[in-house]
Amino acid sequence: MKYLLLIHSNPVTWGHPSFLNTEKGIALTKKQRDALAAQLEELLTELDDKGELVAAVPLEAPSRTKVVRIREGVRATTDGPYSEAKEQLAGVFIVDVDTPERAEEIAARIPEAQFVAVELRPASIFEE
């Protein structure tokens, strides 16, 4: 089953990995920040080695977002951010795992989970 892990972050100090740009992340020592970066690399390597990683995609800053709506046949495009929420989508992982528990385990290991939200959603992906 494929799962989409949505990483939310505050766009005020946008950058990747986003956990290093949060207020709490900036307050960490260099050793702690390096350990979290290593944790992320270790997780990505493990997922890739096990064939569970479909994609890991950091997103550009919300200020580069465009919103497209069609109303009464007329397209309206506005500049981002797409939402007035305090936290916005910073990046996504797509994983292909055997159980929901494994997907939750992976979400909990993403360093951002210590600072911001990581949303876990089952995903139906059309296969070629």
Image (spheres, rainbow, N blue to C red):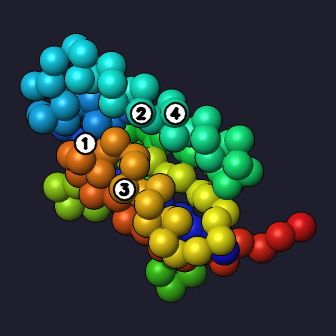
Residue 112 versus residue 22 in the image, above or below: below
Answer left or right for 36 relative to 85: right
CB within 8 Å, label 4 to label 2? yes
CB within 8 Å, label 1 to label 4? no
Q: Position of residue 78 (x, y in %)?
A: 39, 56
Q: Residue at x 45, y 48 (%)?
A: 91
Amino acid carrying mark 4 in the image:
Glu
Disc number placed over residue 108 in the picture, else none: 3
- Residue matched to label 4: 42
Give the secondary structure at mark 4.
helix
For marks 1 and 2, the one nearer the N-term is 1
- Residue matched to label 2: 39
**Mark 1 or mark 2, whichever is nearer to me:** 2
Amino acid carrying mark 2 in the image:
Gln
Answer left or right for 38 relative to 63: right
- Which residue, as the protein is rendered here, is positioned at the far right? 128
Residue 105 figure quarter: bottom left
Quadrant in the picture for the C terminus: bottom right
From where the camera sits, is residue 60 visible?
yes
Amino acid carrying mark 3 in the image:
Ala
For marks 3 and 1, the one nearer the N-term is 1
What is the C-alpha distance between the residues marked 4 and 3?
14 Å
Q: Position of residue 120 (x, y in %)?
A: 43, 68
What is the C-alpha distance between the residues marked 1 and 2?
23 Å
- Residue matched to label 1: 11
Give the secondary structure at mark 2.
helix
Estimate how packed mark 1 is, as few (under 14), some (14 to 19) or many (20 or more) residues with alpha carbons within 10 Å: many
What is the C-alpha distance between the residues marked 3 and 1?
21 Å
What is the C-alpha distance between the residues marked 3 and 2?
12 Å
Amino acid carrying mark 1 in the image:
Pro
